[in-house]
Amino acid sequence: MVLGKGASSSLSMKMADGAEDMVNNNNFTVLVVDDDPLIRKLHDMHLKNFGLRAQVVENGKKAVDLCHVGANFNLILMDREMPVMNGAEATKELRAMGVNSLIVGVTSCGSPNEKQAFMEAGLDYCFEKPLTPDKITFLLQELNKNN
Amino acid sequence: MERNPMGRQLAIMRQSLFDQGYLDEQFIQLEELQDDANPNFVEEVVTLYYRDSARLILNIEQALERKPFDFNKLDDYMHQFKGSSSSIGAKKVKAESTLFREYCKSGNGEGCTRTFQQLKKEYATLRKKLEAYFQMARQAGPMETACRPK
């Protein structure tokens, strides 16, 4: 199938439901921004299972720098609390730079106010950590809509 | 699968971790990510969790030694710790984290101290249980490591 290099047959049998749009997914690029190596590993793995390539960075500044030098992502998964530059600041900067990727906040339950402030920084959606296949399926649907 | 008695023991051990409330559905999410290409994924993630969270535990311990308590800082540390704990499905640990944060928000120092002791117990207990589980899984053979109940 169109799973990319190194795909084994067991991987294709394990594909999550709703991943029939697999063919399109190979062209989506994802950036995972989180200071927790556990979350980075988890999200990277989740995304791999959907045939998505992810780059991972550990704070908002690195995300901004990447986009600054021209990297382009369809989807950015943004943690809220990170050192150096947090998710809200990074989102604001990215939007100010003209980045119109789907930016999705992924946070551990903050207060409704904090979530609101994060959304207002320019997020398209805000989910609770960690990502699950359902949420990824939803995001892929959104990506497919816009492309 | 029944021809493998170790496999059955493993399944029983696994089920009891859920039944006794040590793990929740998030752990199942990890298991679902494990496959032939990544046969030790769950164990890797759990190892990573214990390695990284050790630092947070230490930070909290040190912060609890400074009087008066800086509740904001304590809450921040616990917020991070809770996030990681949720990610591996550590149900009891997560519950204690939530309680700790509530005590932070209400400025209850004694509650924080007490809850933290309980949290450390649960954290250590879970570690032992998971170590035993992974050891059994290795003995039972690769086909038994990932059970995917639906």
Image (spheres, coloured by chain):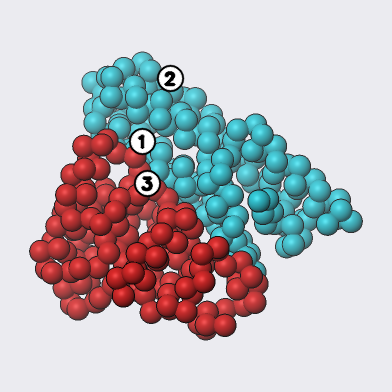
Chain colours: A red, B cyan
Viewer-nearest of discs 2 and 3:
3
How far is disc 2 from disc 3 in space, using C-alphas? Answer: 28 Å
Q: Position of residue A4 (x, y in %)?
A: 50, 82
- Quarter of the view holding residue A63: bottom left
Tell me whether marks 3 and 1 sit on the same chain: no
**Which chain is home to disc 1?**
B
Q: In the visual, does B125 lie left or right of B115? A: right
Q: Name above or below for residue A72 compared with residue A142.
A: below
Disc 3 marks which amino acid? Glu
* Furthest residue in direction right, as rendered: B3
Inspect this view and state whether residue B134 appears. no
Look at mark 1 in the image and give the residue it sits on. Answer: B78
Going 73% across and 62% down the picture, which residue do you hit? B142
Residue A95, compared with residue A8, is above or below; it is above
For disc 3, the marked residue is A128
Residue A118, given in percent of the width and then of the height, sits at 21, 48
The residue tagged with tag 2: helix, strand or loop?
Answer: helix
Q: Secondary structure at mark 3?
A: strand
Q: Residue at x 70, y 41 (%)?
A: B15
Q: Nearer the viewer, residue B117 or A64?
A: A64
